[in-house]
Image: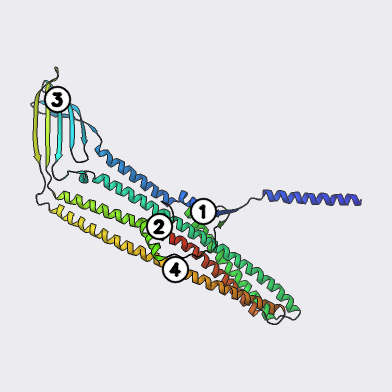
């Protein structure tokens, strides 16, 4: 009987262990961990605003292709049908034309004509040459140059969106880390207060603590527990923000992982300014805008010239049955149907000149603004370094105060007022120190953004 009882106990324990293992295996993990690097990669790949910017680049590339087609060989139908009370005429053929990049337009048109009862074959060759207005690549390639400029702007805008997205992702990840660390600190303090409460209850029963000591611990415990609620809500909002940046649903709880190691460094403002002026894409964009304004000014100057076109036509025709093109006709003409005063064109030229001057001023203002941004960011980081040094000293003093208050309370030399105050102070200092370190880390990324080195181009 004794052996049977022992056997049943062993079987029960084995079943319990197997059941626990099976349950542990079946329980799904709802915790997802995303590193800072992974978050940046996912954001750059999935972010919806970035995808829209990519579509803008594709659209600009198509616009460049469209403007290039202007100089391809064109084949057009050349037909005409005329009826009157006295005669009828029709012609059928096609025109092969090409426009050159300097403005010349040439065409060859083979035709078959019917006029009355007579059929005629003909070949017509035409040449149109702009002599003043409209001559040269500056005028004829204006559409192509404008499309290329728009494509470059789209690419620069895409890069700037990438930079902003990366910095937003970094900031959001570290905000989540702040909330997670704050929850850990508050949870640690809650556990310490619960132990303090248990100890105070025991000491109250034996007369080493008063009811006021018990009230202090209970009130402070409720305060800390109340502080956790808004932090959890804040963490949820930050997680939703990260989900939106990543454009990817996140199921269950999320834990972000990123280095919070504090590594202060020294940056010389002069060197940082030189790096920023050579790397910031805004400088490149402003210079390119100046170049485009200069090109538009040259174009506006060309438009002041009167429009005079030289047109030459040569035609050979003959009997359609014999295909004898014995008849020749040619003519040369000068056409200039424009306003000789060119008032609108002169006003447009003056406007283009003003625009060029403004772009040059904007470039200088941009350089000054970037220099101020660099100095301001470096000054902010220097202030944070001094603040962190002060926080470290405050944390050291708070730890000493806590040890002293705990020792006095444990030995009945003081009530728990100083102990609770010390616990509150050290929790606040630890939170402030952690937040200041994280802010400094984020500031290093902001400095890289200001310098134009946050991501590669």
How many angstroms separate mark 1 from mark 4 (CA)?
Answer: 25 Å
Which element is circle 2 on?
loop
Q: Earlier in the sequence, mark 2 or mark 3?
A: 3
| Quarter assignment of residue 196 | bottom right
Whether residue 247 is visible to the viewer of this picture, yes or no, is no
- The residue beneath circle 4 is 380
Can you tell which of label 3 and label 1 is closer to the viewer? 1
- The residue beneath circle 1 is 37
Whether residue 435 is visible to the viewer of this picture, yes or no, is yes
How many angstroms separate mark 1 from mark 2 (CA)?
Answer: 19 Å
Q: Position of residue 288 (x, y in %)?
A: 30, 53
Mark 4 Cα-neighbour bin, 10 Å: few <14, some 14–19, many ≥20: few
- The residue depicted at 8 percent of the width and 37 percent of the height is 333
Which element is circle 4 on?
helix
- The residue depicted at 33 percent of the width and 51 percent of the height is 153
Q: Is residue 36 above or below residue 231?
A: above
Can you tell which of label 3 and label 4 is closer to the viewer? 4
Q: Is residue 367 above or below residue 400?
A: above
Foreground residue, 104 or 319? 104
Q: Are marks 1 and 2 in contact (CB under 8 Å)?
A: no
Mark 1 Cα-neighbour bin, 10 Å: few <14, some 14–19, many ≥20: few
- The residue beneath circle 2 is 452
From the viewer's perspective, is 273 left or right of 441? left
Q: Are marks 1 and 4 in contact (CB under 8 Å)?
A: no
């Amino acid at each position: 009987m004794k052996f049977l009882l022992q056997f049943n106990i062993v079987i029960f324990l084995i079943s319990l262990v197997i059941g626990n293992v099976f349950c542990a295996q079946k329980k799904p993990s709802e915790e997802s961990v995303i590193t800072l690097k992974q978050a940046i990669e996912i954001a750059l790949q999935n972010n919806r605003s970035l995808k829209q910017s990519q579509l803008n680049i594709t659209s600009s590339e198509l616009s460049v292709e469209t403007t290039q087609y202007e100089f391809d060989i064109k084949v057009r139908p050349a037909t005409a049908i005329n009826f009157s009370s006295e005669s009828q005429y029709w012609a059928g053929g096609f025109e092969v034309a090409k426009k050159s990049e300097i403005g010349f337009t040439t065409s060859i048109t083979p035709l078959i004509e019917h006029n009355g009862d007579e059929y005629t074959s003909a070949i017509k060759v035409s040449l149109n040459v702009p002599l003043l207005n409209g001559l040269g690549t500056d005028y004829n390639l204006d559409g192509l140059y404008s499309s290329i400029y728009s494509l470059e702007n789209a690419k620069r805008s895409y890069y700037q969106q990438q930079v902003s997205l990366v910095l937003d992702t970094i900031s959001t990840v570290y905000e989540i880390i702040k909330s997670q660390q704050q929850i850990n600190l508050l949870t640690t303090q809650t556990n310490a207060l619960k132990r303090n409460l248990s100890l105070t209850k025991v000491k109250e029963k034996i007369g080493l603590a008063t009811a006021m000591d018990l009230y202090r611990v209970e009130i402070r415990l409720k305060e800390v527990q109340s502080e956790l609620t808004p932090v959890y809500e804040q963490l949820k909002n930050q997680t939703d923000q990260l989900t939106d940046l990543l454009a990817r649903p996140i199921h269950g709880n999320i834990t972000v992982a990123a280095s919070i190691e504090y590594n202060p460094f020294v940056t010389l403002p002069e060197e940082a300014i030189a790096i920023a002026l050579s790397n910031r894409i805004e400088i490149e964009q402003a210079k390119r805008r100046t170049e485009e304004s200069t090109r538009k000014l040259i174009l506006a100057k060309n438009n002041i010239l009167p429009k005079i076109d030289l047109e030459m036509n040569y035609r050979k025709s003959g009997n359609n049955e014999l295909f004898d093109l014995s008849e020749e006709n040619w003519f040369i003409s000068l056409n200039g149907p424009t306003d000789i005063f060119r008032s609108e064109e002169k006003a447009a030229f003056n406007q283009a000149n003003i625009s060029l001057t403004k772009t040059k001023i904007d470039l200088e203002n941009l350089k000054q603004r970037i220099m101020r941004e660099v100095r301001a960011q470096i000054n902010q980081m220097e202030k944070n370094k001094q603040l962190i040094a002060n926080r470290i000293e405050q944390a050291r003093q708070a730890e000493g105060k806590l040890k002293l208050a705990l020792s006095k309370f444990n030995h009945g030399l003081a009530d728990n007022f100083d102990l609770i105050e010390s616990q509150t102070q050290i929790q606040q200092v630890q939170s402030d120190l952690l937040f200041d370190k994280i802010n400094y880390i984020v500031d290093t990324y902001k400095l890289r953004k200001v310098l134009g080195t946050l991501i590669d181009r």
